Amino acid sequence: MLAVRVLEKREAAVDVLSLVLTSVDGGSLPPYSAGAHIDIALPNGMVRQYSLCRADAGGGTYEVAILRDPAGRGGSACVHRDIKPGDTLTISHPRNLFPLVPASVSILFAGGIGITPILAMAEELHRQGRDFELHYCARSPERAAYRELLAQAPWSGQVRCYYDSEPDQVRFDARQILSGRDDGTHLYVCGPEGFIRHVRDAADQAGWSDARVHFEHFSASAAPVTEGDEFELVLARRGITVRVGAQTTA
Ligand SMILES: Cc1cc2nc3c(=O)[nH]c(=O)nc-3n(C[C@H](O)[C@H](O)[C@H](O)COP(=O)(O)OP(=O)(O)OC[C@H]3O[C@@H](n4cnc5c(N)ncnc54)[C@H](O)[C@@H]3O)c2cc1C
């Protein structure tokens, strides 16, 4: 685990705030690749995952952006309400379950707060001089985190934003965006469940193989598991196997 200090807390959009974290001793933080996230131990005792939303510039800071979720159990509300600049937090080392892979072109799709790992990917792809495009869907410009950064980035010409509040603009058409692409093109999608499903369906209809479609969900199904079979949970990195009973949660 790592101890970090909150250097900045800023409003990134309506209901979204960003935190810039730095190590407590002023040293560097571990490097990470685009798509990585950290666990944050919150002041209310909950642990929540947050994507690192800027490409690692080796500057010794991490940035996360957090949407307040009124349907949640209180983790995001705690961040918005209780965390302030100067606070010390405990976080995990970065972990990447949503990494970029070599591709002729990378197509990045973000829905709402799903922009967080996608922004890091865009910055990383630009730094590597690789071809990419970013499609960002949000309810309105005011709710689109990092909208100004995207508009001012040197790669802003590769970004297209779609807002539900502006029906007269060009319509988001995932199927059309994904049609006619060569086999070296890879797709990354992050956002609400319905958005991910829509883009994956469009990729399917456009003939994309699963191996070229990468996605990350931010939440598990809200349906609680009330019954099931006994199973073994393998904690590979710790070399531990735990038996979880049918009436027990892991
Ligand atoms: C890899 C990863 C990266 C993430 N990155 C970000 C990020 O960059 N920014 C960000 O804002 N969030 C991110 N999240 C989501 C984040 O970890 C939290 O889930 C989010 O902040 C909401 O926390 P909460 O405690 O308010 O809500 P939670 O209690 O986590 O609930 C979230 C949603 O789960 C559903 N839910 C409600 N109750 C239950 C229940 N009992 N059991 C299961 N589900 C329930 C609801 O639909 C609710 O809206 C990420 C999650 C993952 C896994």
Image (cartoon, helix red, strand yellow):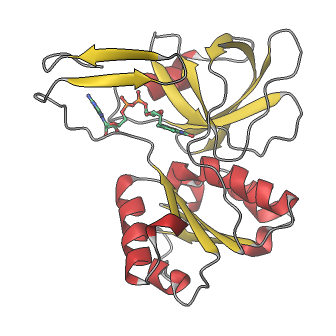
Q: Quadrant of residue 84?
A: top right
Q: Quadrant of residue 147?
A: bottom right
Residue in front for this viewpoint, 104 or 172: 104
Say left or right for 24 vs 185.
right
The answer to whether residue 117 of the structure is visible from this angle is yes
Q: Is residue 88 above or below residue 50?
A: above
Q: Quadrant of residue 154?
A: bottom right
Q: Residue at x 75, y 31 (%)?
A: 62
Q: Is residue 101 above or below residue 59?
A: below
Report the residue that reaches farthest toward the bottom: 180
Q: Residue at x 59, y 55 (%)?
A: 144
Say left or right for 193 vs 36.
left
Q: Is residue 239 above or below residue 71?
A: above
Residue in front for this viewpoint, 179 or 109: 179
Residue 177 in the image, given as x and y percentages of width and height? 54, 82
Say left or right for 129 vs 41.
right
Q: Quick one: quadrant of the N terminus?
A: top right
Residue 183 in the image, given as x and y percentages of width and height? 59, 80
The answer to whether residue 110 of the structure is visible from this angle is no
Say left or right for 38 vs 242.
right
**In the image, ligand 1 is in what quadrant?**
top left
Q: Is residue 195 above or below residue 243?
A: below
For the image, the number of numbered tags is 0
Residue 26 in the image, given as x and y percentages of width and height? 89, 14
Q: Quick one: quadrant of the C terminus?
A: top left
Q: Residue at x 47, y 60 (%)?
A: 139
Q: Residue at x 54, y 26 (%)?
A: 80
